Structure formats: structure tokens, C-alpha cells
Amino acid sequence: MKPDIESNLPTESLSFPEGRQLARIFLPAGMIALILTLSGIFFNAERFFYSWLTGFTFIASILLGALFFVMVQHVTRSSWSVVLRRIPETISYQLILLPVFFIPILFGMEYLYEWIRPERIATDELTQHKLPYLNFPFFILRNILYFIVWGFLGYKLYKNSIALDHSGDLSLDKKQRVLSAPGILLFALTVAFASFDWMMSMDSHWFSTMFGVYYFSMSFQAALALIVIITLFLIKKTAFSKIINQAHIHDLGALLFGFTVFYAYIAFSQFLLIYYANIPEETLWYYYRFEGSWIYLAYLFLIGRFVLPFILLLNKRAKSNHALLTGVSIWILFLNFLEMFWIIIPILHKGAISVHWLDVASFVGFLCLSIGFFFYLLAQNSLIPKKDPLLAESLKKH
Amino acid sequence: MSQSSDTQKDLLVKGNHDFASVTRLISDIPQQKTPAWWYIAFGISNILLAMLLGMVILLIWNGIGVWGLNQPVGWGWDITNFVWWVGIGHAGTLISAILFLFRQGWRTAINRFAEAMTIFAVMCAGLFPAIHVGRIWAIYWIFPLPNSMQLWPNFNSPLLWDVFAVATYFTVSTLFWYVGLIPDLATMRDKVKGFYSKIAYGVFALGWTGSNRHWQHYEKAYMILAGLATPLVLSVHTIVSFDFAVSIIPGWHTTIFPPYFVAGAVFSGFAMVLTLMIITRKLYHLEDIMTIDHIEKMNIIILVTGNMVGFAYAMEFFIAWYGGVEYEKFAFINRAFGPYAWAYWIMITCNVVAPQFFWVKKFRRHIGLTFFLSIVINIGMWFERFVITVTSLAQDFLPSSWGYFSPTYVDVLTYVGTFGLFFTFFLLFLRFLPMVAISEVKGVMPQADPAYYRNNQKH
């Protein structure tokens, strides 16, 4: 039974060498856009750092979401996802490059983080109270730690998977599991504290225990959206279509649907609890993000990031409708950037939405560069983990 | 790429069973002579249940002053027990609905069992809010009934949302459980000998014949109920957490409460399922169906949810310091080092330290250790609710009114009595209903593969 399924499928030879051509378009495009963004430092330094941080947190969220996806599949020994696991593996491998893009932020600390400004430290009691945590050396140390953890996990999970392709050594498969289980625990802690450091501490008085979970819920939804987009793109372009069937797509769609609800649950719970208790030190964060025209973005997230995808993807058939899934996923990816924008920019521009071309350049730059790297890496290896012990089961999925 | 060796190892049902022997294994249990241990257990449960009834009557007669509640602690064991029981009631629906949607075949061995446990646990939980209002004869005021006084419940209060959430959860869980039972009730109807038992099973089997059309409708209904039950798994404990978190009491008001409570609920629910399952599989010789692999999988979920709870504790503690709010800081230092420090450290030991054993495969597959830890975890989860409820109230904003909560014998006996309620129903379930979903277990056996017999003839 198994041999006749496998012999008809191009599992051994499936790759995507055309990825190099795509990389040749996306990499330079991303580079140019990011250089343009970097040039902003000369004429609007303040805005540059805010735009850069927005783009950085956006791309970091996707890479981290993909890393989580890979680890969960290993821990649960999921067979359904094996055929498409190379995609999130390749996305999260880029985490080793993430620290490079963090460097500019270190030069803009004074613009971005009020807790580092000496006059603030001198006059503000709360900032003094937080000094043992919120100070520059410890900030750098923590971030180095995050990047080591993520880089190590992203690197190892990818390299082991590639090595398994070549050697077929099944002990590697076990290694992936052994790595992923504590990996998820480390991931939870590092992502939570990274989100506190990067974004929550910008409003240095504000705090929310949920913030780490909130950042994660956005990350995972966005990462799933990107995985959907790439999977459907590869189905169109390659013999991937013979390997992936509607059942795989349906499961991806169901996950996207499920984590859309999860995102809404977390985001709304955080809002409701703060709104209901109505304590000034907590409500202020929402106050600035609801002030003036910023409120429209909040409505947009409610409707666009939850209600709309919820209704569109509720139907069973919708979850495997390629065109619809692609559309919804691109939209969610875009809204993920916009939500980072909504979290970060109101600190700079109170009361009214302000869009600068640097924001656009940063968005395009980070996204194109990441996609470029992705296709560059993808082109070098098999499209599927071809020697994975669960591959046969994954192919049989119905 | 020989698949057969893998699947042999991963079989969900052990011991070379075929369809007929699985049916016999489960459906024979209600037909056998009632074992002696059952009468003993049922007797003890009934005594406890009678005691519960006595305590509730005592409470209604005298008012809630018979509990240890006083200023400043107005919520004590009542709410602790409510949250504890309702948390235990989460495992059933999680196993039935979420694991069903995630296509986890192993759920079939334990879903019936866990759902029954859920329903009885929610019954125990529902008792507490009902009796803690004091004037139970006015309890119907919690429902928005039109009345001549134009008196409405406060729709802004999560305590009211709780009424709806728990009632919905109970209704949907019961329906879900019953719909899943129908094919097996028909099996029982066909198997039992007695005239009256045939009628009883027959009535509840709703004329099931196992026709293709019946199965189609059944599958569709089951799918819809699973879809409905999934958000309920999250919503019930989310709203229970709102009971605390919407207030401005230090230690209660923190944004991570909703997912943290849900994780804690699943954690304690799975522990309770394990406690009961380990005893039951032994007593009824169901080791082939509820296998060691099931126990290992559940232990993994316990490890994951236990760490989620630990993560939430860490976040709360960090933000209590980071936020710099004086009262919040005090509440947490007071929890860990104040008069209730003993309860806090029991909670940490049981909920955060104990599950770490399950990192090791050998411990995950050790039945004795699993049984012990499953009880430890539920003790820990009881203390978690106790710590949250009581520590924040006992040392409130006004130091002159600080107090120390001590339960009275009525508190203790009411809580112990709920075990009587729980086990009375649970033992009846074990005695009269098929405790494993026979048809679903068959669905995950290799024989259910249409190609099974063809392939096996070849070899």
C-alpha cells in the first residue's frame, strides 16, 4: 500500500530552484528599502527609529511565530504538518540574522525609551524604581540572551532537519523533540520579556501581565498567515501540489481560524480588564491609542483582524479555498504590521494617525528582505523533509 | 519505510482486540453482578452526600455566618470550592471537543469518562454560588425575570455572566455527553437481558439502529456540538477569572488572569481524570483500552499546562514589582511571606515543582507516581484558588481591619460533602453506563481502516 503511493510522488526530488530568481528580486528590493529607511536617520532621526522599531517588531513577530509552529509540531509529533514543515523551518532559521537588525535600535534608545533619558530618571520616581530592570546594560544583556536562545533554536531545528534529508539518521528526529520541549518553555519566557523590553517599556509607567501573551497571539496568527501564503504560492508554482492535498490546506486554514479567535480573545481580555477596572495608570496606554483618529485603527483591528476573518473562514469549505485563504492571510499580515504601528507610533504622534514614508519603507524593507532570504534558503534544499519518519503518514492524510 | 512496525507500536488499543471483544469488554461491565467494592464506595458517598445536605440545610437555616466568613474576608472556601470544581470540570470538554477537532485519536478511550466527570464536577461547583447568596429563596433573582418591582440583575457584573456561562457550559456538556452516548446505549439495549433494563436503555437510545443515515446525522450533530463546546472551554473559566480580575483588589486585578485560569483549569481537570482513570482501569480491567500511552499523553498535557500556570505566577510576580504600584507589591510579598505563606508555598510546590517530574519519560509512564502527583496537583490547585481569594481580602487597604480567615466545621464538611455528591453520581455512571465510547474506540483501531483485511490477507 505505501510503496505505490510514494513511487508516484516526487518526494525525493522536489525542490524549488526558481527561488533563487525570486531572491534576486526580493533581496535587492528589501535592501534598497531598508537603506532608504536607514537614510532617514539624517533628516528625521526620531521618526526613523520609531519606523525601524515598528518594522523590526513586525518581522520578529513572524519569525518567532514560525519558530513556535516548528517546535509545537515536533513536541506533538504531528504527522499532518510534516509535508509543509520546511516552510516554517526556513522562516525561523532567519532568527540568526535578527540581532543584526536590532543594532540600529541601540543608537536610538533616547528617542524610543523614556526610561533611559537622564532628566526622566532624575525627576520620575517610578522610573527610578524600575532602574534595576530598565537600564541600558541590562537591556543589552537581556536582548543578547533572547537572540542567543532564538538563534540557537532556529538554527538547530533547521540544520537538523536538513541533515535528516541527507543522512536519514532517525536519531536526529528525536533530537528535534528533545530540543523543542524545553525550547517552548524558553520561548515563552524570552518572548514575554522581549515584548516588555521592546514595546511595553516605551510607556515606562504602563504594565500589563498579559502583554507577552498579547505579542505572542499576534505573532502566531501572522506566522500562520505567512505559512498559508507561501504554501499556496508553492502549490501554484511547483509539484508541491501533488504532495499537499486539500486536507493539509484545510488544517492550516483551521489553525489560522483558531488562532484568529485566540488573538481576539487575548487582545479583548486585556482591553476589557483595563477598561473595566478603570485605573489611570493602566488606562493611559489605551487612552493614547484611542485618542483622535487612532481609534479608527482600533476598530479596524476588531473588525478586520477578528470579525472579518472569523466570518470568512467559518465555513468548512472556506478553510480550503485557496483564493480566499491567500486574501485573508495577506490582509492579516498587513494588519499585524499596522498593529505594531498602532502600539509604537502614538507615543510619538498623539491624537492623530501619522503615516510617514519611512514607515512604508521599513515595512517593505523588512518584509522583502525576509521573503528574499526565505526563497534563497528554500532554493538550496528539498521542499519537504523527505526522510522524516512521519512523512509517509503525512502524505496519506485525508 | 516499513510503516507496520511503527503502527504496531503506536496502537491505541492494546492486547489484540477485535471489534467484538472491545464491545464485550465495555458492555459487559453494567451487566455483571455489582462488585462488593462498589457497594462500599457508594455507601460512603451516600453518607457524605447526606452530610452535604445537612450542612446546606444548616447554612440556609442559620445564614452564611456558619461559615468562617467575616470582615474583611467575605469570600472564603465557598468561592475556592466553586472555582476548584468548575476548573476540574474543564477536562471533559477539552478532551471531547478540542482534542476531537485536533483529531487526537487517543481521546476516544477517555472522553466518555472525562465528560461524565465534567458534568458531575460542574454540579458540585454550581452548588456553591447558589448557596452562598444567603437567601436561597431569592436565588431566582439572578435570572433577568420581568417583575413588578422593575428589579433587574446587574448586567455589568461578571458574577451574572458567570450564571449564564456555567449554565450554558453545563447544558452543552450534558448534551454533548448524551449525544455521544446514543450509539452505545443502543449497543447496551441489544445486549442486556433484563426486560426493564432493555426498556430503559431503549428509551434513551432514541431508536438508534446504526443505519447509514443515523450515523451521518450523528456525526454532524457531534461536530456541531464540538464546535459549540470549544469556545465554552475558554469562556467559562475566563469569566470565572473576570469575577476577580475586573475588580481593583490588589492580586485580583491583573490582565493575564483569563488565559492563566483556563490553563489552570485544564491542569487540574486532567489531574482529576488521571486520578479516577488509574483506579477505574485497574478495577474494571480496562488496561488494554486506557493504556500507559494514554497516561503518558495526559501527563504531557499536565506538564504543559503546569508550566503555563508557572509562567503566569512569574509574570504576576514580576509585574507586581515592575508596575511599582505599592498595593500590588504588598499583595504579592504578603502572599509569599505573609500570614498565608504556608498556603502559597504549598501551591508553588504542588503546581510548579511537582509537574516537573514529567519531563522524564520514565516518570510519565510510572503509574504509581502519576497517581500520586495527580492528587498533589489537585491539592495545589485548591490552594491556588484559596491563596488568590483569601490573601487579597484578609490584608486589604485598611490595616486596622486586617484579619485571618479560619474555616469552621461547616466549611470543611460542606467541601467534603461535595465529594459525596460527585462520587454518588460517578459511581452510578460507572455502574449503569458504558464508560468508554465503544463506537469511537473502534474508529481508531486498525480494523477500522477499510483496507485492513485486504492487507492482512496478503501476509
Image (cartoon, rainbow, N blue to C red):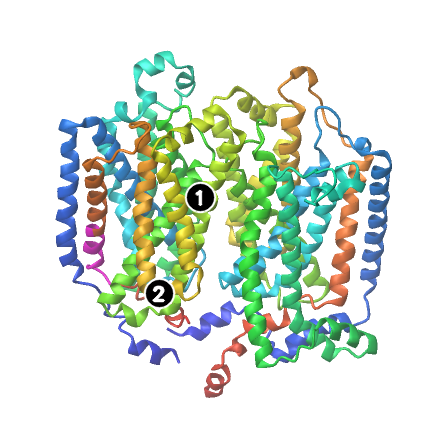
- Magenta highlight on residue B375: no
Dot 1, how many residues are within 10 Å of its Cα: few (below 14), some (14-19), or many (20+)? some
Label 2: state its secondary structure.
loop
Query: In the image, residue B42 lies at what x, y percent?
Result: 82, 57
Q: Mark 1 lies on which chain?
A: A
Tell me where residue B112 sits by quadrant: bottom right
In the rendered image, residue A380 lying in the magenta stretch gets the answer: yes
Residue B272, position as x, y percentages in the image: 65, 51
- Residue at 19 percent of width and 40 percent of height: A361
Point 73% across, 27% down: residue: B405
Crowd band around label 2 with a 10 angstrom C-alpha radius: few (<14), some (14–19), many (20+): some
Q: Which mark is residue A185?
A: 1
Question: Residue A321, labelled with which disc?
Answer: 2
Does residue A97 appear to the left or right of B55 in the view shown? left
Q: Mark 1 vs mark 2: give the one in front.
A: 2
Residue beneath the point at 74% across and 75% down: B202
Task: Give, as a three-letter code, the residue at label 2.
Answer: Asn
Looking at the image, residue A180 sits to the left or right of residue B410; the answer is left
Magenta stretch: give its range.
Answer: A372-382
Question: Circles 1 and 2: CB distance less than 8 Å?
Answer: no
- Inspect this view and state whether residue B363 appears: no
Q: In this view, does B209 lie to the left or right of B46?
A: left
